[in-house]
Image (spheres, grey):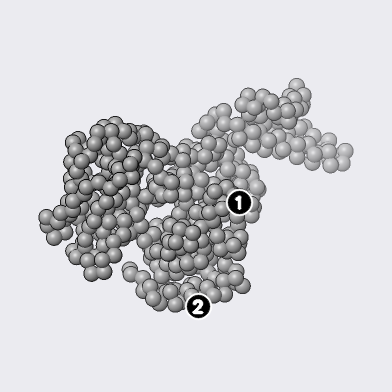
Amino acid sequence: MKVQLIAIVCWTASFFSFAQTNTISQWGRELQQRFPDQYKRAYAIYYWITQNITYDWEAYHGKRKIGQSIEETLKRRKGVCADYAALYCAIAEAAGLVCKEISGIAKGFGYELGVPLQETNHAWNAVYVNKKWILLDATWGAKDPQLKKPANNYYFDPPPEKFIFSHFPEEPHWQLLKPPLSLHEFERKPFVYAPFMKTRIELLHNAREVRIQAQQDTLSLLFRLPPNYLLLASLTDVENKRDRDVTVLNPHPDVFRVLVNGISQGKVYQLHIFAGPKKNASFGAIVKYFIVRGDTLPYTTTSKSKVMLDSLTEMPSSFLRQYVRLKQKEDHLASLKLLYEYVNYYPSNPWLQTAIAENLEALGKTQEAIRSYLKAISLRPNYYRANYALGILYYNQALRIRQELHQLSERERHKVRQNATNKANYYFAMALQYLQTAWQQQPDNAYLKQVISYVQSILH
């Protein structure tokens, strides 16, 4: 469905004029009324953010602390990629849309060929509209006065098969591709610019990899463009910053051949491809390649390369950002909903099962919590967090029974003492096995040692 841009520009200009005096919940209600169609609603949010929020270069360069609330982003009208993604989701959800924050690797500012692509460096969104997921990147679509870059629509609902040239999510399912690409395949794709996302350019023959190995001093690349489009090319010697000879031929109406001459052994060249419609002679950079002859730029990734997850939880950072926000609100039901969703993607992650148990315990669902703790321990028997939490759960149950017993009158206590003592000791014994396993992982934990000693004194 094509967005009627002019109408949306007018509507968003009038609607968001009172953005400073209304809550996000009020925005959401207004958006649903003004844009009954979900796709237009999703675009209206993207359009306003890209026109009104600019990139926080001070935070990027370390001159200001990264990490601010959604309210601060709106007040300052500045943010880094995580702020853009969080703000988009907050407004989208208030407007009745299902939205996800996605973290991953982006080939953007500062990208260098040959540098390992393993750590996440960017955040963007997926939003569910009209019964399907679409992707968007409000950060890359936003205007930037410092870079003299106007806002653009290239990064709203780009084709997933093109978006993957520049955006590789931590979680493969957010590629929206079947089958998903590996990190190594992503690394090998050419470096692309914004117009590539919605220009019907096709990379033919050996024009499909960012690093092109020349076997001799000449090279030929093929591209297919829409009718009435033109293609230009520029080659630069990286070392000497000198332009080199490039010839562009048009052997067929929609096919262009780029001929590169004079490729020297051991040299590195950058080849830029520009394209645009003939009628307005406006050419934008579309694709960039690195041409080498010899082993000047070896690949640093392999078919087994993967995105690095959080070292403590072994979970993606986009998930952790959402989970931390929910935990700060003490919203255990919403936390559980998020955790159960991710169990489908990470079924063997013990941290995930432990987090589920912790939220169930906070909601008073003790038996369900115990089952989740045991699930985590079955996945990793020596997992400290689950063993510790389950041990403390049983320990507290035992203490509670003893406390309740002491609160009874002497007569009442005499009747139930034996059963209560047996039950408390059962819980103490259950606690002991899990606490001892946890202590083996952290023998310097003085509190844990003290609890274990206390339980042992009672049982013996």
Left/right of residue 122 with respect to residue 206 in the rendered view: right
Q: Residue furthest right?
A: 410
Mark 2 or 1, nearer chain start: 2
Residue 223 spot, x, y in % from top left: 20, 52
- Report the residue marked by disc 2: 14
Q: Quadrant of residue 291?
A: top left
Residue displayed at 43% across by 74% down: 9
Q: Nearer the viewer, mark 2 or mark 1?
A: 1
Secondary structure of the residue carrying numbered label 2: helix
Residue 300 spot, x, y in % from top left: 37, 34
Left/right of residue 286 with respect to residue 15 in the rendered view: left
- Report the residue marked by disc 1: 64
Residue 230 visible in rendering: yes
Secondary structure of the residue carrying numbered label 1: loop
Query: Relative to 443, does residue 174 appear above or below in the rendering?
Result: below
Query: 214 and 386: which one is in front?
Result: 214
Q: Quadrant of residue 114?
A: top left
Query: 6 and 383: which one is in front?
Result: 6
Give the spatial CA distance, label 2 vs label 1.
33 Å
Left/right of residue 282 with respect to residue 424 in the rendered view: left
Residue 396 spot, x, y in % from top left: 72, 38
Q: Residue furthest top?
A: 460
Q: Amino acid at mark 1?
A: Arg
Image quarter where the C terminus lies is: top right
Q: Amino acid at mark 2?
A: Ser
